[in-house]
Image (cartoon, grey):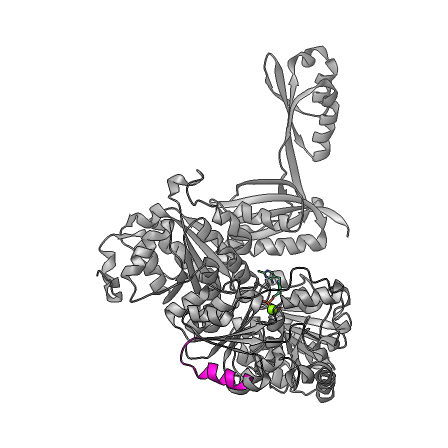
Amino acid sequence: MYQVHLKDVSLINMKKISGAEAIIRCLISEDVDVLFGYPGGAIMPVYDELYKFQKDINHILVRHEQGATHAAQGYARSSGKVGVAIATSGPGATNLVTGIADAQIDSTPMVCITGQVASYLLGSDAFQETDIIGISTPVTKWNYQITKASEISEIISKAFFIARTGRPGPVLIDITKDAQFDMIENFEYKKCENIRSYSPIPPINKSTISDAGKLINESKKPLIVWGQGVILGNAESEFKDFVEKTGIPAAWTILGVSAISTNHKLNVGMVGMHGNYGPNVLTNDCDLLIAIGMRFDDRVTGDLKTYAKQAQIIHFEIDPAEVDKNVKVDIAVIGDVKQTLKEILPHVNKSSHNSWVRKFRELNKIEFDKVIDKEYNKQSGGLSMAEVIKSINENTEGNSILVTDVGQHQMIACRYMNFNKSKSNITSGGLGTMGFALPAALGAKIGDPGREVIAVIGDGGFQMTIQELGTIFQTSYSVKIVILNNEYLGMVRQWQQLFFDKRYASTEMTNPDFVTIAKGYFIESKRVSHRKELNSSIKQMLSHDGPYLLEVCVEKEENVFPMIPSGSSVSDIRLE
Amino acid sequence: MKKTTYTISIYTENNVGLLNRVSAIFLKRHINIVSITSSESEIPDIFRFVIVVNISKEQVVKVVKQIEKQIEVISVFYHTDKQTIFLETALYKVKSSSLFEEKQIQNMIKDSRANIVTVKPDYFVIEKTGWRLETEDLYQKLKPYGLLQFVRSGRISVSKKSMDISRILNSK
Ligand SMILES: Cc1ncc(C[n+]2csc(CCOP(=O)(O)OP(=O)(O)O)c2C)c(N)n1
Ligand SMILES: [Mg+2]
């Protein structure tokens, strides 16, 4: 078997190599050690090179290209590196679109490589020709079609630079088949370090720092709301220092969670539609709202006309286009959050806001009595989703990575899971893509193999990318899959119950036997429907060496509360 | 919200997909593009799009930030009509017979300071460069005589204040 080894790299300047080989060498130079993909006609030259380079790059054969993007996202979010997905032209490329859109809205660094028909066929409606550049333009940070082998090196280095820097995002590179076949002389790869039309990190305006510091020092009832920007910016420790020095209560968006640990004394819970009672209600009572690396998504703000109107607002943000987009702010501290948080620290007084923090605790206690205690500490009746998370908490001590799909189980899992480490919650936030979790969990495991990865998935979403069980089986990565089976598209059913007079239009599902399906893929599996078996089953799952699927039959018509009905004010959050 | 006419000038790297990317930003927000032109700018290899829209101040600020965010966009400026010098060109194709039979047409051309660019046996073409009001005025006047074709260009404009694109480029 013909195999190339990395040490040959120095020799390549002397001989001609194909565009396809150049692509692989570019990826290796970008420290890519895993690709998620699916082959086909227009990308075959690259796959041929992957065969030769299999010692250097691990190609994970997914079962659907959507799975490749979600796996790449999971990989990126657990490792902090750029995830790479690869597919053929036409249907292969269009199958990537959902994952690309997801990565765009959740700022996940990803590079997608697609094959394309030969350049002389472009525009002729050739077999499997599709305008993936046109299709992906609105959902990519950047995209580019390569038609000449000589462009490969420069464009791929740009792709990684753009995906990774500033506010990260997905980049798609479409490469015609002739460009993969063509030979190039004197291949050279230089990492891109600068693009003149692109400023990934806007310069900091020092006066915004001191002005923000002043406002913070004067405020009596400040509230921090942080998002994923803290994690993407590797600013966890600067953030913790800021929170602890100022003594300001801090609430998280669903993508921000795990930047500081769940049980930190100033962590007051989640904001948004299914967030906690305290931070939502007090958003409309604080005198200063400090938003850090978040973008005022409508699921966070509810009705904008009544959102934090009484408060002054400071926004720490890397992307100037996010400033004043949804919520008008008083001070925008634009820049890299790791830097801005570091710079503001000397401007803020050491302080504590004990009675103000207590208010959050008091309101959250109301939520505890009305909602949490009943489901988290449930003693009788059908199993609740919350007690499954409780059992996971008790057996993992906040050290595992949680990957969730979309729906009720997602909200419950993110609300109740304990986190001690950053990059521990991987979910589809902005796009709410059902089918995300299973492939993303595989990617997350590969991105950080030392950590336990637990996917919590609904019975509906599981069936959207169920075929990735095949990928998990073939690669035998130890992913733990927990299906919370309520035999409903639960979140939609909840809305039907609350807002459509219980007309359950097409939300009840007759499901297959998930345990048998797992068996078909030779994945260990078990079903549990009784409380007394729950904890031992979770233990069994966690102690199993290898992938495992646990189906938990939960109460069918449970609802997620608290809830801000869409279009309502955050302070009109309902507890029942 | 009060709507105003804004001229948005976008300096870009020459990239084939960029027009698509930029127009998608307007499309997504249901903003109607009044006119659009694109050409190489005063700096070699740097292109300039001029897009005219009628939107609120708040909207223009948001849209400009979204455009600025695109990788190949170097810089974006927006101006109100007061801040720019702008023109459009219109071409009017009229039956030749009317030029000789209808005396008023010649006066109209003279009065509105338009030019005749071509005269053929069966038609002639008038060109008028000016503000929208002026090209529109001539259009209304010529219409009764049977316009065979009428076409108006997008707006081209220069700002009164400098758009210091070279300095921006050098600082990057
Ligand atoms: C691809 C996709 N299609 C549709 C939806 C709309 N949707 C949101 S939640 C949900 C129900 C999810 O059901 P399930 O996976 O069983 O989770 P549960 O809510 O029951 O926990 C649906 C259909 C979506 N988010 N994504
Ligand atoms: Mg369900």
Q: Position of residue A452 (x, y in %)?
A: 46, 79
Residue A364 lies in what quarter of the image?
bottom right
Q: Position of residue A289 (x, y in %)?
A: 70, 74
- Residue A182 appears anywhere in the view: yes
- Quadrant of the snapshot with the C terminus of chain A: bottom right
- Quadrant of the snapshot with the N terminus of chain A: bottom left
Q: Can you say whether B96 is above or below A534 in the image?
A: above
Residue name at image x 51 percent, y 83 percent: A537
Of the pair B125 and A565, the residue shown nearer to us? A565
- Residue A329 appears anywhere in the view: no
Of the pair A347 and A395, the residue shown nearer to us? A395
Residue name at image x 49 percent, y 60 percent: A170
Q: Can you say whether A446 is above or below A505 in the image?
A: below
Q: Can you say whether A131 is above or below A495 in the image?
A: above
Q: Position of residue B118 (x, y in %)?
A: 59, 19
Rendering quadrant holding ligand 2: bottom right
Identify the main secondary structure in magenta: helix
Left or right relative to A367: residue A189: left
Left or right relative to A363: residue A316: left
Residue name at image x 53 percent, y 81 percent: A237
Total marks drawn?
0
Q: Which residues are magenta?
A: A534-547
Q: Can you say whether A168 is above or below A280 in the image?
A: above
Residue A512 inside the magenta-drawn segment: no
Q: Position of residue A221 (x, y in %)?
A: 73, 81
